[in-house]
Amino acid sequence: MRSFEAVLVLVALATVVAVSARRLRLPAPSLLVVAGVVVGLLPGVPAVQVSPEIVSLVVLPPLLYAAGEDLSWRELRAVWRPVAVLAIGLVLASAAAVGAIAVAVTPLSGSMAFVLGAVLASTDPVAVTALGRRLPLPARVQTLIQAESLFNDATSLVLVRVAVAAAVAGGAVSWAWGAGQFALLAGGGVAVGAVVAAGVALIRRRTEDPILETVIALVTPYAAYVAAEALHVSGVTAVVVASVILGGLAPHLTNAGIRLQLHAVYGTVVFLLESVVFSLIGLALPALLDDLNGSLGDLPWQVLAIAATLLAVRALWVFPLSLVMRPRSRPPWAAPAVVSWAGARGVLPLAAALSIPLTTDDGAPLAHRGLVLTITTAVIVLTLTVQGFSLGPLVRRAGIAVTPQRARDEDATARLHMARAARDRLDELDDLQAVPDAVSRRLRRSLNARVEQVHPSGEAEDSIEPTYRKVRRELIAVESRELHRLHETALITETTRRRLQRTLDLEDASLADNPGD
């Protein structure tokens, strides 16, 4: 019972802090981590030990799925080259650099230093998405940062497996074996994710029950993760691939009412899980420091040296890649600086560190496992706080933030095109005499008012209401297709498309005869 009460208290505390972060316009992950550390340092607070099963199986899949669904296929295609370079090359370089620094500044052996480097080599999709969600970043930069954090996990997981195998076996592991593991993990994860996405899409196309749709959406990330892990391939990659595919197909799989319900349910789940997991990271650090039995003398400098190494290596890779990215912003350092500074660590490195075995192959305790876990958690806390709190000011200082006026202009352009497309369709229906004059006049007044940016006036008679609803919903479908075309032709960003699609869904749902229509 005490464990259950502790969970409730943690959820309540994390929720209060997350809501406060929104009101204060501070990054929620950073404030949650700080609050967790502060609470963990209070006298009488029990030590917190994070279970690897809880992080890997319960927390990661839905958060990864939510992050992957936000990616736009069109915008992802535009940045796939730099994403591939960062997801493979930067991860390898970061692991090697951290391993070398760790050998120099910590008591870790070469094999355990490489384990630490592999664990910290990749950025975290959950942290990166949570930090960047409220920043007015350009679509290209936002997609690059988010896609890199989602697709670099296969490389880092292979490195962790190679490094752990070497540390546990007490010897080196061949690079050929490592390359084979990478192909198996990444390729297998992609295949499993694609199969799960295809199956889920097939089911959702034939389902219009809101409750069943919600259950399917909640189960999908867990199904992809468990299926991939059962086949000994990357569960994280499977979840990411499934989420990206289903995210792109979402407008074609369900109706407006179900999309609104899924958005509300998943928003709640993501909010609670993010709030709890970032609080747990902060709470775990004091307990890990206590487990080191007071041998903390050089730990702060070790953590700073490793975090600085990660930042330096990332900058050395990102700035040359700015030529590939071809940023249109000025000054030319702006986009690379933001991408470099956005490489926070979070839940995924923590899960990797928790998965390190306790013993070697001969049954002896694995030396310095606790130190690796402590340094990992400390670097996570440091990056979430320092980079998290300063990322927003850096975006504004760099001058690449999307201005409110630019967002309003893009929104107005999209609305104008959508209203004109609907009006053209109404003209076709009038020519075919398929719509009563009263319905046509009411719809035309509404569409003209939207073009002129004024509120529609006047009410139709009850007798024409059913026909009005039917035709208006047909016109909403036309507007949705036009909105999709504007996005595919790069006239609007994914953010604008999602916002306006939600507006159309709200109107469509209000016109439905019942929630299942």
Image: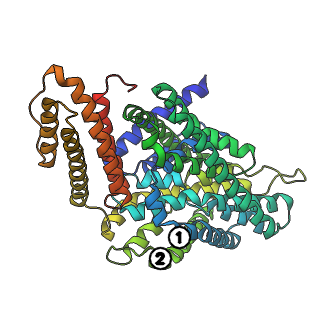
- Horizontal side of 375 relative to 474 (left or right) equals right
Residue 200 rendering spot, x and y as whole percentages:
57, 38
Q: Earlier in the sequence, mark 1 or mark 2?
A: 1
Please tell me which residue lies in front, 102 or 210: 210
- Residue 238 rendering spot, x and y as whole percentages: 63, 49
Left-right relation of 400 to 179: left
Instruction: Pinpoint residue 171: horizontal percent, then vertical percent.
Output: 85, 66
Q: Is residue 257 left or right of residue 317?
A: left
The amino acid type found where label 1 is placed reads: Arg
Most distant residue in the left direction: 458
The local secondary structure at tag 1 comes to helix
Instruction: State left or right for residue 354 relative to residue 15.
Output: right
Question: Which residue occupies 55% across, 30% down?
Answer: 6
Mark identifier at residue 509: none
Q: Is residue 414 above or below residue 177?
A: above
Which residue is at the far right? Answer: 362
Residue type, numbered disc 2: Val
Q: Which residue is mark 1?
A: 81
Quarter of the image that includes the C terminus: top left
Q: Which residue is mark 2?
A: 324
Q: Residue at x 58, y 44 (%)?
A: 197
How far apart in space, not on screen, are marks 1 and 2 (Cα)?
8 Å
Task: Give the secondary structure at mark 2.
Answer: helix
Report crowding for label 1: few under 14, some 14 to 19, many 20 or more residues within 10 A (C-alpha).
some
| Colour scheme shown | rainbow
**Residue occupying the far top of the picture:** 463
